[in-house]
Image (cartoon, coloured by chain):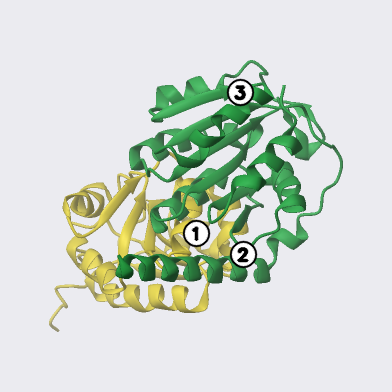
């Protein structure tokens, strides 16, 4: 099994201008190590992280969009797998952190702990769907996660993280949303400028 | 007395023209019998609009929010039952996070000429009171004479970062 914080740490070392859409427990862990303007947090409507990410991927084709979804969250919006593959943005990467529990809600188990999310994604039509459960495979797959054309799906089998109340108040803030809006606007301007110089 | 010929008909093309005038480029939709032939089918055939078909109505709220961060305007098109299904997403994303979510809601079964609140259908009767409780501005689009409300409502939603609801009260033709 993978350690989520170690995986996030490796991703943090590699990520530059990618938009990261994170939700619940993974979001608080990600924010703790990577507080950056291009983070977008999905809260209040569990299951919708991938839908937010899909909209962002369509709106920002020059950015890679990494969605850090939860297993319980994805189960609340399984149709998103079909919608995402119908739209099929090449910059869309759907990462599901599979620990078998509703970690943000007290650690209760999923209705079934034998769900194979990568197989569901493959059947829905993702261009590529990986299931990764050990660190060396994760490290080997990082290049693909960060550069291959999507839509990609990555199921990471992780240990349950820290239980207990986590604070989402800061993530909800209007200031953070505005900072994100300005950051993507700035990046879009930079991309246009780079294009005009070519 | 001369009866206004536009008072008892709603053309899907009129709705589409109004939506385009508000710079909407994406339609996020779950099929609804009420708007199926007169509106959704026409949208699907319109090369200047991009239709994104989704599986459940709450997906439209997330996608629309994401699109808005790239200045792409969209409409979420679904039936009132889908509005009820997507309630938590609407509450959290559209209302509490102040996002410009523009919903076009088909009031399937609403009797033409009857106010939604007075419909014999329970599901239709409760829509406007729910929108009022959520603080979401709403407009009844029942005939071509109401279509003029569409563009200003969408413009206001994007200008003020708040949701709006356009209630399709009659089956468009």
Which chain letter goes with mark 1?
A: B
User: Which residue lies most toward the bottom here?
Assistant: B1
Residue B123's x, y, as percent? 48, 50
- Callout 2–callout 1 Cβ contact below 8 Å: yes
Element type at mark 1: helix
In-front residue for pair A116/B169:
A116
Front-most of residues B103 and A71: A71
Q: Say if residue A116 shows up in the picture.
A: yes
Q: Which chain is green?
A: A
Q: Residue furthest top?
A: A114
Image point (65%, 23%), residue name: A136
| Residue A97 x/y as whole percent | 65, 33
Q: Identify the residue at horizontal 62%, vertical 63% (top origin).
A: A37
Residue underneath mark 2: B97
Do discs 3 and 1 share a chain? no
Task: For chain B, give the colour.
Answer: yellow
Disc sitting over residue B65 in the figure: 1
Q: Quadrant of the C terminus of chain B?
A: bottom left
Q: Which mark is residue A69?
A: none
- Image spot of residue B113 (x, y percent): 31, 65
Location of residue A167 by image quarter: bottom right
Question: Which residue is identified by label 3?
Answer: A137
Judge from the rendering whether residue B40 lies leftward or rightward of residue A90; answer left or right.
left
Q: In the rendered structure, the residue with mark 2 lies on which chain?
A: B
């Amino acid at each position: 099994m993978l350690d989520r914080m170690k995986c996030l740490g490796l991703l943090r070392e590699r990520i530059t201008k990618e938009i990261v859409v994170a939700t619940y427990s993974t979001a608080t862990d990600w924010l703790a190590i990577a507080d950056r303007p291009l983070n977008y947090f999905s809260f209040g409507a569990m299951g919708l992280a991938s839908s937010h990410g899909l909209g962002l991927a369509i709106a920002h084709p020059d950015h890679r969009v990494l969605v850090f979804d939860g297993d319980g969250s994805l189960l609340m919006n399984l149709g998103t797998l079909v919608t995402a593959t119908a739209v099929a943005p090449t910059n869309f990467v759907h990462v599901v952190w599979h620990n078998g529990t509703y970690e943000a809600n007290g650690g209760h188990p999923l209705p079934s702990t034998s769900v194979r999310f990568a197989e569901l994604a493959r059947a829905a039509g993702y261009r590529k769907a990986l299931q990764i459960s050990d660190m060396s495979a994760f490290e080997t797959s990082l290049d693909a996660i960060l550069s291959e054309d999507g839509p990609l799906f990555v199921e990471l089998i992780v240990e349950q993280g820290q239980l207990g109340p986590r604070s989402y108040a800061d993530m909800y803030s209007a200031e953070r949303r505005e900072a994100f809006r300005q950051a993507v606007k700035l990046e879009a301007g930079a991309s246009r400028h780079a294009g005009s110089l070519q | 007395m001369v009866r206004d010929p536009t008072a008892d008909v709603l053309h899907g093309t009129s709705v589409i023209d109004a939506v385009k005038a508000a710079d909407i480029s994406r339609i996020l939709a779950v099929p609804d019998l009420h708007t199926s032939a007169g509106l959704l089918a026409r949208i699907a055939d319109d090369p200047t609009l991009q239709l994104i078909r989704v599986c459940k109505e709450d997906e439209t709220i997330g996608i629309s929010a994401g699109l808005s961060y790239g200045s792409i305007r969209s409409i979420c098109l679904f039936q009132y039952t889908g509005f009820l299904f997507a309630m938590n997403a609407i509450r959290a994303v559209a209302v509490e996070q102040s996002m410009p979510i523009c919903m076009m809601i088909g009031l399937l079964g609403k009797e033409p000429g009857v106010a939604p609140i007075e419909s014999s259908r329970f599901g239709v009767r409760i829509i406007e009171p729910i929108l009022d409780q959520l603080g979401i501005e709403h407009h009844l689009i029942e005939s071509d004479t109401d279509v003029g409300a569409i563009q200003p409502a969408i413009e206001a939603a994007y200008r003020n970062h708040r949701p709006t609801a356009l209630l399709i009260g009659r089956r468009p033709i």
